[in-house]
């Protein structure tokens, strides 16, 4: 019999007065044994992340607090221990990988310094030993050039690289329990497979218990021993992975599973011959320069984009897929002119927009908009949500009253309640913030939408609704879209054509159904073979069933996901 590491019994977490509901979670019973992986799934706002934070003693007390129940770790009730004891437990005995790496990492400390800090506080090691171990950890999570990453700051890394750096920190002291809150959300499928294997290997060696929070049922199918399904703070179903995924009992579980995108591409549609965007031989290089006033050694030069050529046709969705660091987001930022190109041409309606001055580019902003990957970093924390969404139209000359009216409509369309209009970004869960970002990008009714991982932070049911919503908007507004994603299931259901990128180059372009059926490049073959849960037979063969669900107004949710 495996030793029981964690036992959560009748746990209640109370929310502040005036919240959407009295309890964020209630009557929660969970247990975790050595060497076991327990996956907790549920929609944004179901209480998954708050349960994890309670285990770590990271609740924002006294406003949000444990009001009843116990969390027993190795015979000790975590809810009743001192702050000093919690500090000893964190990292060394219980470690956590957070959902949003940019907000969890210290922006003014290098990655190496942050890993070194963990060792300095918990173990006795020389500086050389700490540095050697840190480099080994970064190599274990497949970060390129670990020595260079050691000296890098979080803003200098891509989203996926930041996530991997945080995973390395969580694994540093080989904890008994690893709590992983959406740890592979920002990762491409090949790196995701490597990280999941890394966690599994660690379990095998150290008998680590893993509490894995995710909305990716493919990951659940691949790694889980047991599954707990949460809805509105209550565990509605639990059991072995085979029981829950292949024979779900609760209607909510069935609805979640039916929303999982299929790997079979959707029926192809006729693509217009009218080009709305042309990208030809675009290149972008970072680094290579010297320090302040030209002193110091030249920095390493990185070719982020190398002669990228793509066309976007009227009304189509072009998917751009590839590993973290392949140049997908850099390409998006060059197209929307958040970044200047070094060479090549980006043309819309006969105008080469990459040559326009910043002031002249302003008139093109209502034609092309972008949904960013990290919703928390892209939303102004000091401005209310309604004003965030209305900001773009007001800047373009729309009357404030009309812009705010449009903002209210968009808030409803993306599935948030009316009270969201007056709230601030920090009051929402990760998935809810992503919906705010989507609403903001649609406020100007653009002709071209660049979506950089727009549904990566969303649970499967909301993901399905948002994808349906984007599809409806594309049809109604004749919207053309560049859809950047690492989720090949989503790509199969959203994209008419796909471009596969590796190391800044486009290695394969074609119709989605052709690439999935017969990939030509070895890299594309590797991506498709690494898709999590590809052998799970319980996945519904249909996806996005019922367009009406995209416009349905869900129940109000608090920040408890």
Image: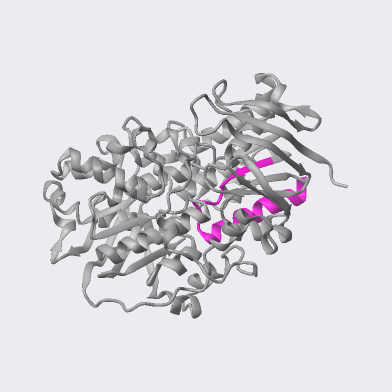
Vertical side of 336 occupied by 72: above or below: above
Residue 376 falls left or right of residue 203: left
Vertical side of 515 occupied by 487: above or below: above
Front-lying residue, 185 or 443: 443
In x, y percent, where is residue 341? 24, 56
In which image quadrant can residue 495 be found? bottom left
Residue 556 falls left or right of residue 372: right
The residue drawn where x is 17% and y is 58% is 353
Residue 402 falls left or right of residue 270: left
In x, y percent, where is residue 65? 60, 25
Quadrant into which the C terminus falls: top right
The residue drawn where x is 17% and y is 41% is 395
The residue drawn where x is 32% and y is 48% is 410
Residue 136 falls left or right of residue 331: right
Confirm whether the magenta stretch covers residue 186.
yes
In which image quadrant can residue 325 be found? bottom left
Confirm whether the magenta stretch covers residue 335.
no
Note whether residue 295 is visible.
no
The residue drawn where x is 81% and y is 40% is 4
Image: magenta residue range? 178-206
Name of the residue lying farthest toward the right: 1
In x, y percent, where is residue 386? 30, 38
Front-lying residue, 316 or 372: 316
Q: Main secondary structure of the magenta part?
A: helix
In x, y percent, where is residue 420? 38, 37
Looking at the image, what colour scheme do you see? one colour
Name of the residue lying farthest toward the left: 360
């Amino acid at each position: 019999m495996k030793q029981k590491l964690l036992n959560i019994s009748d746990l209640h977490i109370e929310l502040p007065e005036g919240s959407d509901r009295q309890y964020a979670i209630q009557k929660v019973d969970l247990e975790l044994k050595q060497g076991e992986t327990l996956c907790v799934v549920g929609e944004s706002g179901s209480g998954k992340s708050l349960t994890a934070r309670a285990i770590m003693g990271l609740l924002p007390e006294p406003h949000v607090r444990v009001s009843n129940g116990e969390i027993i770790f190795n015979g000790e009730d975590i809810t009743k221990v001192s702050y000093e004891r919690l500090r000893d437990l964190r990292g060394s005995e219980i470690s956590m990988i957070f959902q949003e790496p940019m907000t969890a990492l210290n922006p003014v400390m290098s990655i190496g310094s942050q890993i070194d800090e963990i060792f300095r506080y918990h173990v006795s090691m020389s500086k050389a030993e700490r540095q050697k171990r840190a480099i080994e950890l970064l190599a274990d999570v497949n970060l390129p050039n670990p020595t260079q990453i050691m000296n890098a700051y979080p803003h200098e890394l891509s989203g996926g690289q930041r996530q991997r750096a945080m995973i390395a920190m969580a694994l540093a002291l080989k904890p008994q329990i690893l709590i992983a809150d959406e740890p592979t959300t920002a990762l491409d499928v090949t790196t995701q497979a490597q990280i999941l294997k890394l966690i599994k290997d660690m379990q095998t060696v150290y008998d680590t218990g893993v509490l894995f929070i995710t909305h990716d049922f493919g990951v659940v199918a691949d790694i889980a021993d047991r599954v707990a399904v949460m809805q509105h703070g209550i565990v509605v179903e639990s059991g072995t992975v085979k029981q829950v995924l292949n024979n779900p009992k609760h209607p909510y579980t069935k609805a979640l599973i039916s929303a999982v995108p299929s790997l079979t591409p959707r029926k192809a549609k006729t693509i217009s011959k009218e080009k709305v965007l042309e990208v030809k031989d675009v290149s972008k290089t970072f680094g290579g320069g010297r320090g302040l006033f030209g002193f110091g050694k030249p920095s390493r030069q990185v070719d982020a984009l190398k002669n990228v050529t793509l066309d976007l046709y009227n009304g189509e969705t072009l998917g751009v897929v590839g590993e973290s660091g392949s140049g997908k987001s850099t390409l998006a930022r060059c197209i929307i002119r958040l970044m200047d190109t070094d060479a090549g041409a980006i043309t819309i309606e006969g105008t080469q927009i990459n040559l326009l001055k910043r002031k002249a580019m302003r008139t093109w902003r209502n034609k092309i908009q972008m949904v960013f990957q990290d919703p928390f970093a892209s939303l102004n924390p000091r401005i209310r949500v309604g004003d965030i969404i209305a900001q773009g139209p007001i800047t373009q000359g729309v009357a404030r009253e009309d812009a705010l009216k449009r903002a209210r409509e968009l808030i409803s369309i993306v599935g948030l309640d009316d009270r969201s209009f007056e709230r601030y970004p920090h009051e929402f869960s990760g998935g809810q913030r992503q919906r705010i970002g989507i609403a903001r990008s649609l406020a100007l009714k653009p002709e071209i939408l660049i979506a950089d991982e727009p549904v990566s932070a969303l649970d499967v049911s909301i993901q399905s609704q948002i994808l349906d919503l984007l599809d409806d908007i594309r049809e109604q507004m004749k919207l053309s879209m560049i859809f950047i994603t690492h989720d090949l299931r989503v790509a199969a259901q959203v994209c008419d054509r796909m471009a596969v990128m590796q190391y800044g180059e486009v290695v394969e372009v074609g119709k989605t159904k052709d690439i999935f059926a017969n990939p030509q490049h070895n890299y594309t073959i590797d991506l498709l073979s690494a898709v999590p849960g590809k052998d799970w037979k319980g996945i519904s063969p249909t996806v996005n069933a019922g367009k009406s669900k995209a416009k349905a107004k869900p129940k109000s949710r608090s920040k408890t996901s």
